[in-house]
Amino acid sequence: MHTTNEIRRSFLDYFAQNGHDAVPSAPLVPYNDPTLMFVNAGMVPFKNVFTGLETRATPRATSSQKCVRAGGKHNDLDNVGYTARHHTFFEMLGNFSFGDYFKEQAITHAWTLLTKEWGLPVEKLLVTVYHTDDEAFDLWKKIAGLPESKIIRIPTKDNFWAMGDEGPCGPCSEIFFDHGDHIWGGPPGSPEEDGDRFIEIWNLVFMQFEQSAGEIVGNLPKPSIDTGMGLERISAVMQGVHDNYDIDTFKALIAASESLTGVAAEGDSRASHRVIADHLRSTSFLLADGVLPSNEGRGYVLRRIMRRAMRHAHLLGAREPLMHRLVPALVAEMGQAYPELGRAQPLIQETLEREEVQFRRTLANGLGLLEQEISRIERGFTTRIDVMNTEPGQPDGIRNIEGLPTERELSGEVAFKLYDTYGFPYDLTEDALRSRGFTVDRAGFDAAMAQQKAAARAAWKGSGQAADSEVWFDIAEREGASEFTGYTSTLGEGQVVALVKDGKEVTSAAAGDTVTVLTNQTPFYGESGGQVGDAGTITTNAGLKIAVSDTAKPLGRLHAMSGTVEAGTIKVGDAVNLTVDVARRDAVRANHSATHLLHAALRGRLGGHVTQKGSLVAAERLRFDFSHPTALSAEDIAAIEAEVNAEIRANDPVLTRLMTPEDAIEAGAMALFGEKYGDEVRVLSMGTTSKDASGEHTYSVELCGGTHVRATGDIGIFRIVSESAVSSGVRRIEALTGEGARQWLVAREDALKSTASVLRTTPEEVEARVTALMDERKKLERELAEAKKTLALSGALGGGSGKAENADETINGVTFSGQVLEGLDPKDLRGLLDQAKQRIGSGVAAIVAVNEGKAAIAAAVTDDLTGTISAVDLVRKGVEALGGKGGGGRADMAQGGGPDGDKAADAIAAVKAALAG
């Protein structure tokens, strides 16, 4: 028997030996088609080559391409498990010619591989051609020797392929295998063609025409070949089975499921095992390609697939989470062909287990309500349920819904309650009811959903939001959330779903316009959680260029890119290239990751009371506010900086997990200030791992939705440039990383070198030289002060700048010495007054020192007079004359000052007047 792995290898080897470049499968998330949710055909990765936008080094290629069909218009989800050939994940074998060979060689390759290499019986094969493609008809007769009865002309679009209304198109030729007359069905084109006897195994597309607006306008200059053969289908043929789920790969996965559940894949359990096996493949490959479960976009489709499989595990009676325990069986079957499965196995298993634990809670609550409603309907009673009143303008409360249909249809109100209250997706409700013969009132569900949206809009309008933001509410309600793809990429394609100019929606924008662009998906991060929005460019091959200066996040779920149209025109519906400014993004994420390390270092150094109180993560710098009652010492700052740099040098990977907020916090994650958390959060772990009695601990574990480095070493270097107070109990650190830190250090080194040059020394000797200069200055200042005091006592400061005001005169029987001195340091006043007291023997001395427009006054009273005269009273009179208040000291010595140095003489006069009584 040919195994699936052998068939895949044989196909690729055949075409490689015939001049084809064997290309690895592209990821499931398409990089070149924003209209596709997932890669759903083998030609998708080559789309730009077929349209001429890209050129390959070789004109031939072959691949086994991973494909998913579970969302959008290509959605096989509801049929999976109940039919023989529907899958959410499948592999498409293909060979491609980019303007090289055409129909004759494509048909020759197909026929040679099927009948000579693989030995399929010729009598079991028949083909179809487009009804006007006489060339293909004649080639099949010539190359395969098929009779005309086995070359069927098909006049429908089933045998004419087009990439869209614009671009390459051409006729197809499909190859069918006859599984035998014991299976009902007729050949293609017959009334019984929908039966399962004749199964299409290979489609050859002959791209030979160019079309515009859905009409053929000419021939392609270089006709090309695109073929696709489902690996699961051809494996069934070559393994002698009719059902895809009977091939070796599925049999191994189903056997693992049977073993773990103890339930045979028979009867009602057969479909459940098949669903689990199929969905295990799609969820695991999507996770390996970077898609994570969420409530929007691709992540929501992934979660739907997961939950559908998990419900079937529940139906099989699995008491513990099952899906993650099946991953080793999948890796054993497909890991050699797709090594990304093995690399991502820990992530896949952890994510599946966490999602299943969470979903089992949802399932228990939802199924309880569902069973109640089914029981009521089956008993023939009119359904009566209680739902919250959500009508705008009406008070909150409970209202009763009566008179709902009694036929085997679940009320839309109940379906919506399951969705809104219990997190039960609508399609899961449909799937759960299918085996019971029930349908769901979809119109009623949609009406309940619309009512909730109307209530949300009314609440939002009354919340005080800016009026010009209402346009984003309209867009979000119409288009849903924009999908952010920037965690793993800075490049992408998106389809323009809205344009906003001057606060209003427009359909287009031209050169010179400032416009905000919303696409269905984007790698541009919208400002939130302290991290600034991305900048970059939006372009098309038609000449559009928009310089994006900022990205915002209106309503918390839209990534809106704002900029100026520099060239061309942009219209709603356009497919655009989105390019994030990589250098800026790298600087931002380095600063963001450094913020997490800083937070952990602060808590480790200062204590667990430290929590984030705000942050700014920009390209140029980071700012981190945190709770702490006192300023950090120089030793604290040095230790924190050294610790963060040690974590950076360790270069440990930065790991991301998705968890519920409760589980994340229970696991030790820190919640960051300013973040709003929904049902699920991203948990960022970075830094070294340590162990203690309580287990392993990663240096930093926080909840965060921002972008981050892949490993701590990408931060480069960390430098704290300032620490200051923000408010009572809140401190602020500003820091730099990477190139910003390097430039800061270089600037300071340049300043040091310049200082050394001025001081005529080396940078290493600057400190010693400055210390010597400071010592010399202090010495000179002391000598100058002594000189000033000497001159002051002689009454000739600065060549006569000292002025005696009635020196040594007698006032009211008391000797008084008064003096105004220019340029004297106020701290020298006490020494001068002590000398004045010694000179006069008995009496009062007062000196006013004037410096830079201000004045200080001091007064002294000899000990024999302190019983009747107070120096404090005298100084206060002088201070008042100087325009000041107060003054203090003792009865024998007091000092004060005032702002008006020009009134120095008045101050001396005021003291004298006080003495005179």
Image (cartoon, rainbow, N blue to C red):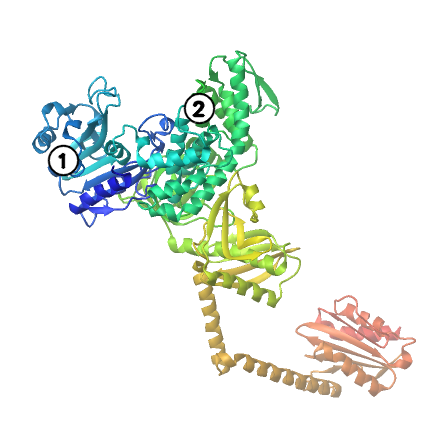
Residue at image mark 2: 430
Give the CA separation, mark 2 to mark 1: 44 Å
Please tell me whether residue 274 is drawn above or below residue 618 in the rendered image: above
Q: Nearer the viewer, residue 413 or 873?
A: 413
What is the residue that sits farthest to the right in this orientation?
Answer: 867
The answer to whether residue 520 is visible is yes
Q: Amino acid at mark 1?
A: Ile
Residue 251 placement: quadrant: top left
Residue 249 point in image, percent of width and height: 33, 37
In this view of the protein, which residue sits in the foreground, 3 or 678? 3
Which quarter of the image is occupied by the C terminus? bottom right
Residue found at x 58% / y 45%: 666
Give how far across and how far down residue 86 sits, in percent: 32, 29
Image location (x, y in percent) of residue 557? 47, 39
Residue of label 1: 107
Quarter-wise, where is residue 739 in the image?
bottom left
One can see residue 524 in this view = no
The x, y position of residue 255, in whole percent, is: 38, 35
Identify which residue is drawn at 85% across, 73% down. Answer: 914
Q: Residue 492, located in which quarter of the rendered image?
A: top left
Q: Which mark is first along the chain, 1 or 2? A: 1
Instruction: Check disc 1 and report its element: helix, strand or loop.
Output: helix
The reply to whether the C-beta atoms of the residues labelled 2 and 1 are less than 8 Å apart is: no
Q: Is residue 283 or residue 912 the one in the foreground?
A: 283
Kindly identify the residue that appears in the image at 52 percent across and 22 percent down.
370
Would residue 617 be found to the left or right of residue 45 on screen? right
Query: Which element is circle 2 on?
Result: helix
Q: On screen, 842 above or below 507?
A: below
On screen, residue 285 above or below 450: below
CA neighbours of label 2 inside 10 A, class few (<14), some (14 to 19), many (20+): some
Name the kind of residue labelled 2 in the image: Glu
Residue 155 is tagged as none
